[in-house]
Amino acid sequence: MTDAVVESLYVYPVKGCRGIDVASAGVATTGLMTAGAGDREWMVVDGNGRFVTQREHPQLALVATAVRDGALTLSAPGRAPLAVDGRAGPARDVVVWRSTVRAHDAGDAAAAWLSAHVGADVRLVRFDRTGTRPCNPEYAGDSGAHTLFADGYPVLVIGAASLADLNARMTARGFPELPMNRFRPNVVLAGLPAFDEDHVDTITAGDVVLRCVKPCTRCRVTTTDQATAHVGQEPLRTLAGYRMDPRFDGVTFGVNAIVVAGDGATLAAGARATVGYRF
């Protein structure tokens, strides 16, 4: 066991769009929550109902999100903010990776706003909470863990020292340091050595217990500048030099976690945490 600190917390109401740096977050089985909305509760889909993210449309990085009483507002440079009707719209099937789940369409105004921003016909949907989307039992076991529109697990944890290590390698190669938002974590932990999260089993902060279940394989979204939507080649090239994991055929940075205790509790930035390891 070792002590750590929850350095910062982030909630991403819309998958692929900008997150919200929160001082505290509600905790649910499906991940962090803020102002009545869950992490990745909304998602952008194409005409076939399949999810799209910054992989296809880097411009989504410029879409800021705000939530109040469970209602969503979108904003972006050069566009008037849009308040999204929080009432349930028509239900439809949508696809996120290998999961087909029910969602509610957020309406024509949201579709038109996002389509104009990304330059393609897309729509906004909200997860239908009468259903669930189970996490992969190969890693989550029989925990019953489930998530909304996150790639696969409710919470992504990254150690602050891991980013510092990467940035030292980046600057040594002549590249600028990167902010943590390139990696879109939910929980940033301070007080651990670089990449210690690779070996973490549980993170306990008050009533909240997270279990780390799978390394996070990183994709080209990490090469998108979250402030400009410019796409480059870093940090994947640097990470490939020392973070390749043959088990997942890619580079890993951060770990996916599930919520095993604390549903309904609150997690605050600055909270002390106890970290348990597995080796």
Image (cartoon, rainbow, N blue to C red):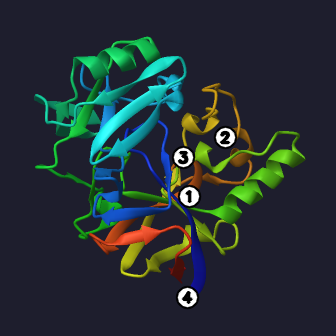
The residue where tag 2 is placed is 236
> Quick one: label 2, few (<14), some, or many (20+) residues within 10 Å?
many
37 lies left or right of 243? left
Q: Nearer the viewer, residue 37 or 245?
A: 37
Disc sitting over residue 1 in the figure: 4
Label 1 residue SS: strand
User: Of callouts 3 and 1, which one flags the residue occurring earlier in the amino acid sequence?
Assistant: 3
10 lies left or right of 28? right
Q: Nearer the viewer, residue 130 or 7?
A: 7
Query: Tag 4: residue type?
Result: Met
User: Of callouts 2 and 1, which one flags the residue occurring earlier in the amino acid sequence?
Assistant: 2
Taking the image as drawn, is residue 240 in sight? Answer: yes
Measured Cα–Cα span from mark 3 to mark 1: 15 Å
Query: Relative to residue 80, is residue 198 depicted above or below?
Result: below
Label 3 residue SS: loop
Measured Cα–Cα span from mark 4 to mark 3: 31 Å
Callout 4–callout 3 Cβ contact below 8 Å: no
User: Of callouts 1 and 4, which one flags the residue occurring earlier in the amino acid sequence?
Assistant: 4
Callout 3–callout 1 Cβ contact below 8 Å: no
The residue where tag 1 is placed is 254
Query: Relative to residue 207, is residue 31 depicted above or below?
Result: above
Disc sitting over residue 249 in the figure: 3
Callout 2–callout 3 Cβ contact below 8 Å: no
**Image location of residue 254, percent across then percent down:** 56, 58
Query: Tag 1: residue type?
Result: Gly
**Image location of residue 134, percent across then percent down:** 23, 55
Query: Relative to residue 279, is residue 96 depicted above or below?
Result: above
Label 2 residue SS: helix
264 lies left or right of 194? left
User: Of callouts 2 and 3, which one flags the residue occurring earlier in the amino acid sequence?
Assistant: 2
Query: Tag 3: residue type?
Result: Asp
